Amino acid sequence: MVLFRRAEELSLSHALLDGCAEGNAGLLLIEGAVGCGKSEFLETVAAHAEARGAVVLRAIGTAAERCHPLGVLRQLAADAPAGALPPADEAGRVEAMQVFAAAVRELSAAAPVVICVDDLHHVDELSSRYLLHLARGARQARVLLVFTESVHERGDDPLLRTELLRLPHFVRLRLERFTPEAVRAMLPDRTEAETVRLHRASGGNPLLLRSLLQDPGSRPGDAYAQAVLACLHRCGPATTELAEAIAVLDGLAGAAHLARLTGASEAAAARALAALDAAGLLADDGGHGFCHPAARAAVLDRMDPAARQALHREAALLARASGAPDTAVADQLLGARHTCEEWALPVLRSAADQYVADGALDQAAAVLQLAREASPDDARRAELAVKLSVVAGRTDPAAAERHLREPLAALAAGTLGPHAMGPLARALAAQGRIDESADVLERLAAGSGRHPGAERRQGEFPGDDPLDGLSAFPQWAASNRRGTPAEAGPLPVGRAVRTAVHPAALWALPVESEEGTAAQAAELFLRGATLAEGTVEPVVQALRTLLYLDGAARALPWCESFLLQATQRGAAGWQAVFAGLLAEARMRLGDLRGAAQTAEGVLRTVPARGGSVLLSAVAGTLVRARTAMGRPEEAAAVLSRPVPAELTASIHGLGYLRARGQYALATSRFHAALGDFLDVGRHMKRWGLDRPRLLPWRTDAAEALLRLGEARQAERFLADQLSGRDAADPWVRGMSLRLRASLREPKERQAMLAKAVDDLHRSGDQYELARAMSDFGQVLRELGEPARAAMVNRRAWHVARECGAESLCVKILPGHTGEGADAGETAETPHADLVASLSESEKRVALLAVHGHTNREIAQKLYITVSTVEQHLTRVYRKLEIPGRQALPVDFHLGVAEFV
């Protein structure tokens, strides 16, 4: 690809060619840094001269041929017409030079002669004398001499350059690097962001810019790396050696440090820096590192590994002695894989903390891993493994879980120190591993001689208290310190607060009397929260509070917002957390397609080598969605993936067990399903988390018992749920009433299902609503009300279709495809203007009618007379321009507010 030069540069060469053709000799010296297009510009001049009929003689000076006398002159003679130029005299006599100059002048009589010599600084001494003699003696001939020279690498013969400068027809042209504006002008089809990226990575160097355009994709590749190495090679061996030191030192690569590291003089180091800077290879932000990480990597990769490690070790000592930041010293220790100095481990730990604060988690993990490998004892290695787990949790949940195996093994062996137990317990609790976290707390309490909730006595635990952080729950939540972990709400942060907090409290809901306050406080907290290392757990707790207390519709936009933040930060582990909550919120709204899409997306994005407890919970949501959609084969494929052994002792395992049970239920393995549901219940009771809002395992177990014909046992579970905590919650009560109705006679079943439909409508769960409406339509048919039954079934079918519940659609209306309109069915939602014309009272009545309620039932619900209901419906039919109740749109609820 040709990168065009500025018009003024080309016009100068054209003017010299014009003068040459008119009999005025010319001498043009093209200067520039390495890679700035000197050779390309020289060839452009040569090609233009040839196009105008000139005789062009070309030669290239090289470092290898500098010691061969007359090498360049022989190249020129070989390029001339046969016999036009005499053989060169190696003795370097003046007479021979005069003969050569005369031959060139004679050749120019027939046509202008343009002599192009690339890299004048590499021309051998004798050839340079011939060229100088020609330049002096051809002033009135049609001869143009065009030379190129690197501004930072002069030849060994100072006479040539000095004498050239004295000649009156001497012209110098300096080729500079491209400016950002020039790059934009050359690449008009690229966006401004792309041209800015290209200029920064190339430094405006034409050779590097061309290589970037050749590399596929948006990142520098092999072509760029080769171009960088070519630039360094052209700068000479001394500069190449210093460039390796620059790559090792990176931001510390000042002239003084380079001189100390390589043994060169400070002046030589300064010249090397100037040459690389002129070529655009160094960053333009005032530092001394390379312009792009890929440039640095290209230099480091070509170094001998042993020599590179040795250089990194010397650089670490130099950085430490010069007072460089711990992160800079740690980078050098990483490159050297060296930790022998007694200060190395403290520096690595300090650097890891700084990297975490800066969000450089890959560097933090690498530094901690090196420190862990170099630690002299098991206790210290286990403590660092906990830190590694916390850092890895942001990007790789599976790795975070694996890092805890070593400290857990140390705990079992009795070698884990108390200062590591607190962070370990917290890390386990954050991963939902309740049993293991509780075990660590018990050991910690036993080892300290006090209960985890006891006050710290003065003089105990000088420095960091190992129990600190275990009660670091969001301060927005209500505080309740009585009763079981399920009753104990999240607690305020601080050393002074010491309570007997079970790890399950991280997942518990507030007591009923505080639910409204907690939900409001959670949303208020979320409005001012941004995602950072210290806010992830509080944000997650706040989202759970909204999800389970205020409903999925309230939590969903917040889940989307924080998932977006996690994605923008490139934090794959956080993405998994918030995507899991988002998938659950969509599942609770009956959005089966959305839940499946969210869960599948995060399972594709987040690494899960060897399985992950957290990702297994997301997989459970996907299984539930696919099962409800009527795709058991896809659900089975998800269940066939390996899961970690720790899953059964984790809070995340409950969701997975429930999903596996629902799949077993859908595939007629009722005993297996019942076993999974009962296991969920046992864990929830043992952990003090037995809240149906969190996970309604009793309704699941009751459904399995009903399939097994165990009606009495099913009734016991349903009665227990309807008389216990969360019994007034519409979602919990609606699902319970739907199942309980199957144990009643048709008339009582109708009333119970009507209540279930109302409750589930208020809960927002469209899938459970469709199931309840399906049962409601069936009982209406049994009671001899086919018209109402048809209307309810039609509505249920449309709700199920919106959810993506394909098998439920088939069950409700076998063979119905939704194509065309059934008798009395309106295909589309009424026009917004028509719906807006309804009064609020009319909307309430119409919505209840769509749900299949009779006029009398509507009157009872709204505390109005039957006559008033009839009047409202008459006005609704007229305003919506429909003939009657059967023509009420099945998706009428989409066009109105939720009133009931």
Image (cartoon, rainbow, N blue to C red):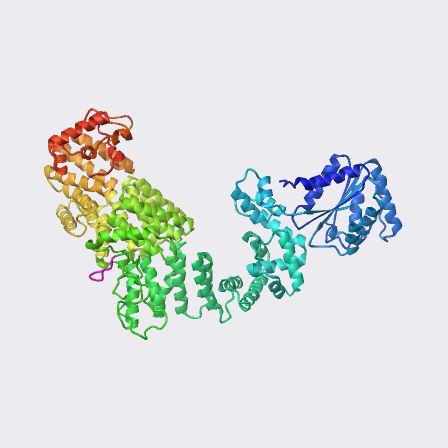
Quadrant position of residue 484: bottom left
Q: Is residue 140 above or below residue 867?
A: below
Furthest toward the bottom, the residue is: 459
Q: Quadrant of the N terminus?
A: top right
Q: Position of residue 491 (x, y in %)?
A: 27, 60
Q: Is residue 634 visible?
A: no
Q: Is residue 483 magenta?
A: yes
Classify the position of the C terminus by image quarter: top left
Start-end of magenta stretch: 478-484
Q: Which secondary structure dominates the residues rendered in magenta? A: loop
Q: Is residue 103 visible?
A: yes
Q: Which residue corresponds to the image point at 17% horizontal and 30% vertical from the top-left?
A: 872
Count how many numbered circles sit on residues in the image. 0
Residue 729 painted magenta:
no
Decide if residue 378 is on the left or right side of residue 230.
left
Question: Residue 528: image x %, image y %?
Answer: 34, 52
With respect to residue 874, does 222 lie above or below? below
At horizontal 67% and vertical 52% (from top left) the residue drawn is: 234
Q: Name the residue rendered at 84%, 37% in the picture.
A: 109
- Tell whether 50 sits left or right of 554: right
Residue 764 picture location, percent across and down: 24, 42
Looking at the rendering, which quadrant does residue 465 occupy?
Answer: bottom left
Of residues 306 and 397, the one drawn nearer to the viewer in this rendering = 397
Residue 203, position in %: x, y? Answer: 59, 49
Determine which quarter of the picture holds residue 311: bottom right
With respect to residue 722, does 367 lie above or below?
A: below
369, 127: nearer the viewer: 127
Left or right, 224 with reference to 688: right
